[in-house]
Image (cartoon, grey):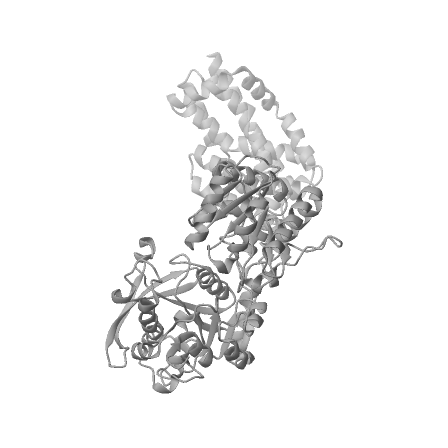
């Protein structure tokens, strides 16, 4: 009974509060009195009679009713109502809004069903919660809070903001904007959650605007687009024709040029195609990726004999590689065997390459041929292919080594080429009346001739280096020029070379190179000593490379402070002599009679100096690689060695290597001793030279640009 009377009193109090709120609501819409905020904050919770009744009914059936009532009396909704739906000018809207208040629904939900009641009890029974509830029953602190928040702007304005969708006060907008709060309302409220969400969204239009403003205010980080490098114009299509190309097959510097130059030209706005023989020795990993492009029969010999021509294609690094397939010519394990077999092979290859271009309907602006193996291409193009689609292409012939010219009996070459008789004259193919020279014919018919260095272009016009073609080259000197080769930084780069024990660059070469020297000494069984002066020699073992000079002075090099490392194969006399020196000077000399790409990288990285005492050298790549790896080259002033190595001047402390001019062993020994003296007595000058060499640009970029300019000049 006391409980019932208490409930009646409370119901009466609620009704009385409702009437009071209704009376004051009208005044609230007009007057921006801060006190009105308190009344309005109380109004929404007490205004809804059905909700109150619902609470009463459910409280009777539950022992936890007292606590639920306390919740109702405490009106936790006051706080939420104050912030989310403050002061509605119209009673109707206030009623609607109050029904949607999560706090009241929370009270209902806690008193609704038994499981819910238990949950409510658990939450209410906590003593701190009760204290909080009691505080909220008084509703004064809450009102004060509202007043504090509303001090900056009148409460009435806040109310108008909600109802009339005028720009809202910041705090109201923030609450209306909060999506998680809306979700909470939907979850806890039983009556029409969708409508509530709609109301919130509708009333929060100004907040939405504010949200947009906030988004706009945030600085959007725009990614700075790197300026697109403009490609040189005009674009040219170039067909490279040669007998070898890294990584498919390589025996010397030609293979490096045929790989690196087309790749660099492709970056400089050239459409490049490389045509090669499909040798049986090409690794299977490349052969299995080749795509069949077609095949046809081609007349080759003067008697009408025809041969099969197959085309297999492989695309890599922006370059198209087309392989000429014929088992009769290319089944041998090596690209070069003997002259008797090689002459028919490369007569067939030169003609088949042009026929393949016609078959594929690819018309290049320039056809770039290399050495005697492809020297008949300009001859064929100017005679038998003159009236075909590719007949208008210009031709460039590059001499990599003038010593090899493809000379054989004139009748045999005439038979295998099927060329007209008028090309076999003293100004074209014929030499010494009875022989034919394939390289000489190419030089005659090519539109431009290049060599691999400027000095070599001059040297081959002299009797000493002209190999009996000096007069012919002087006659065609107007179309002769020299362009120095480069090295491919994707392969030869100490900073990224995966074969090295320790990678290094210009910044740490002085410390890291010593570690590579130690690793090399350990690998080769040399005495491990950082103070030793290590000389490397990576070369074909032939007399062209000046190895007879090395043989003469090698015993004088071994003085207890010097070590020599040799890598290469070639003539038996040099192989045997270097084996002897290895046995005679164990721990000081190591002769690797083989070619091992990985060991070559180790020698470049671990040596202090590299020896290149060539009798003649068209260009030379070893001295370029050595400089890029921080080695000091010791070279003879000839060909490309003279163009790329500037002799060191002890008075100005400038230069990047040590050189000698005449082909004499005493001068070679003197150059080595000068290098050793600087290494042991003026180490800081040596280190500066090492850094200068590493900083020097020896890439293909500059060389490729010169070739491209040549192509453009030819095709204007």
Residue 622's spot in the image, x, y percent?
53, 55
Q: Is residue 83 above or below residue 640?
A: above
Quadrant for residue 224, please give it. bottom right
Residue at screen point 52% across, 23% down: 71
Residue at screen point 49% across, 71% down: 467
Q: Seen from this angle, which residue lies furthest top?
A: 2
Quadrant for residue 370, please give it. bottom left
Q: Seen from this angle, which residue lies furthest right?
A: 651
Camera-side residue of 250 and 120: 250
**Would residue 334 be visible to someone looking at this image?**
yes
The number of discs equals: 0
Q: Seen from this angle, which residue lies furthest bottom?
A: 422
* Left or right of residue 716, residue 161 in this image: right
Residue 177's spot in the image, x, y percent?
55, 43
Residue 394's spot in the image, x, y percent?
46, 79
Quadrant for residue 698, please give it. bottom right
**Would residue 20 be visible to someone looking at this image?**
no
Camera-side residue of 197 and 583: 583
Q: Is residue 489 above or below residue 292?
A: above
* Left or right of residue 471, residue 679 in this image: right
Residue at screen point 62% across, 33% down: 39
Residue at screen point 42% across, 39% down: 192
Residue 184's spot in the image, x, y percent?
48, 35
């Amino acid at each position: 009974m006391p409980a019932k009377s208490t409930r009646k009193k409370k119901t009466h109090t609620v009704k009385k509060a409702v009437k009071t709120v209704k009376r004051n609501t009208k005044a609230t819409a007009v007057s921006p009195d801060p006190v009105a905020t308190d009344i309005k904050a109380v109004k929404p919770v007490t205004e809804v009679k059905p909700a109150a009744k619902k609470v009463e009914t459910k409280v009777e059936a539950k022992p936890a009713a007292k606590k639920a009532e306390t919740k109702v009396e405490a009106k936790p909704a006051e706080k939420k109502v104050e912030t989310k739906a403050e002061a509605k000018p119209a009673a109707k809207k206030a009623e609607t809004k109050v029904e949607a208040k999560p706090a009241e629904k929370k009270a209902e939900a806690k008193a609704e069903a038994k499981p819910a009641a238990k949950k409510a009890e658990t939450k209410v029974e906590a003593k701190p919660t009760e204290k909080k509830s009691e505080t909220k029953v008084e509703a004064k602190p809450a009102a004060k809070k509202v007043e504090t928040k509303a001090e900056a702007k009148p409460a009435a304005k806040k109310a108008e903001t909600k109802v009339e969708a005028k720009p809202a006060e910041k705090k109201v907008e923030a609450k209306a904007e909060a999506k998680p709060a809306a979700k909470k309302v939907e979850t806890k409220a039983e009556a029409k959650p969708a409508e509530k969400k709609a109301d919130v969204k509708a009333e929060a239009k100004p907040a939405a605007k504010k949200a947009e403003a906030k988004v706009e205010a945030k600085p959007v980080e725009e990614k700075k687009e790197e300026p697109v490098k403009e490609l040189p114009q005009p674009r040219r299509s170039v067909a490279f024709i040669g007998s070898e190309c890294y990584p498919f097959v390589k025996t010397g510097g030609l293979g490096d040029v045929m790989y690196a130059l087309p790749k660099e030209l492709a970056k400089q706005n050239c459409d490049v195609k490389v045509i090669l023989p499909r040798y049986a020795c090409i690794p299977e990993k490349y052969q299995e990726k080749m795509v069949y492009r077609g095949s046809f029969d081609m007349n080759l010999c003067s008697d009408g004999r025809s041969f099969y021509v197959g085309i297999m294609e492989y695309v890599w690094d922006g370059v198209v590689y087309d392989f000429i397939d014929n088992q009769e010519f290319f089944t041998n394990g090596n690209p070069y065997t003997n002259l008797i077999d090689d002459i028919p092979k490369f007569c067939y290859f030169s003609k088949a390459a042009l026929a393949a271009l016609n078959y594929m309907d690819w018309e290049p602006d320039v056809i770039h041929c290399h050495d005697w193996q492809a020297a008949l291409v300009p001859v064929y193009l100017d005679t038998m292919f003159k009236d075909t689609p590719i007949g208008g292409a210009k031709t460039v012939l590059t001499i990599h080594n003038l010593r090899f010219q493809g000379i054989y009996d004139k009748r045999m070459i005439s038979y295998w080429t099927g060329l007209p008789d008028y090309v076999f004259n003293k100004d074209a193919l014929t030499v010494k009346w009875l022989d034919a020279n394939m390289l000489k014919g190419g030089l005659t018919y090519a539109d431009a001739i290049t060599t691999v260095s400027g000095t070599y272009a001059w040297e081959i016009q002299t009797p000493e280096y002209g190999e009996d073609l000096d007069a012919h080259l002087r006659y065609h000197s107007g179309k002769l020029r020299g362009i120095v080769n480069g090295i491919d930084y994707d392969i030869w780069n100490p900073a990224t070379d995966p074969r090295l024990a320790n990678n290094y660059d210009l910044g740490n070469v002085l410390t890291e190179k010593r570690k590579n020297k130690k690793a090399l000494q350990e690998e080769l069984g040399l005495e491990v000593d950082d103070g030793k002066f290590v000389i490397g020699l990576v070369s074909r073992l032939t007399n062209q490379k000046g190895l007879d000079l090395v043989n003469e002075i090698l015993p004088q090099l071994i003085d207890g402070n010097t070590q020599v490392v040799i890598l290469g194969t070639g003539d038996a006399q040099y192989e045997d002599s270097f084996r002897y020196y290895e046995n005679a000077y164990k721990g000081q000399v190591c002769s690797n009679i083989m070619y091992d790409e990985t060991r070559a990288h180790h020698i470049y990285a671990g040596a202090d100096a590299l020896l290149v005492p060539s009798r003649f050298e068209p260009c030379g790549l070893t001295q370029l690689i050595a400089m890029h790896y921080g080695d000091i080259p010791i070279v003879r002033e000839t060909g490309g060695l003279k163009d790329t190595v500037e002799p060191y001047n002890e008075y100005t402390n400038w230069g990047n290597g040590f050189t000698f001019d005449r082909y004499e062993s005493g001068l070679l020994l003197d150059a080595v001793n000068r290098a050793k003296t600087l290494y042991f007595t003026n180490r800081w000058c040596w280190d500066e030279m090492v850094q200068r060499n590493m900083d020097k640009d020896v890439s293909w970029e500059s060389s490729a640009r010169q070739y491209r300019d040549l192509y453009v000049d030819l095709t204007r």
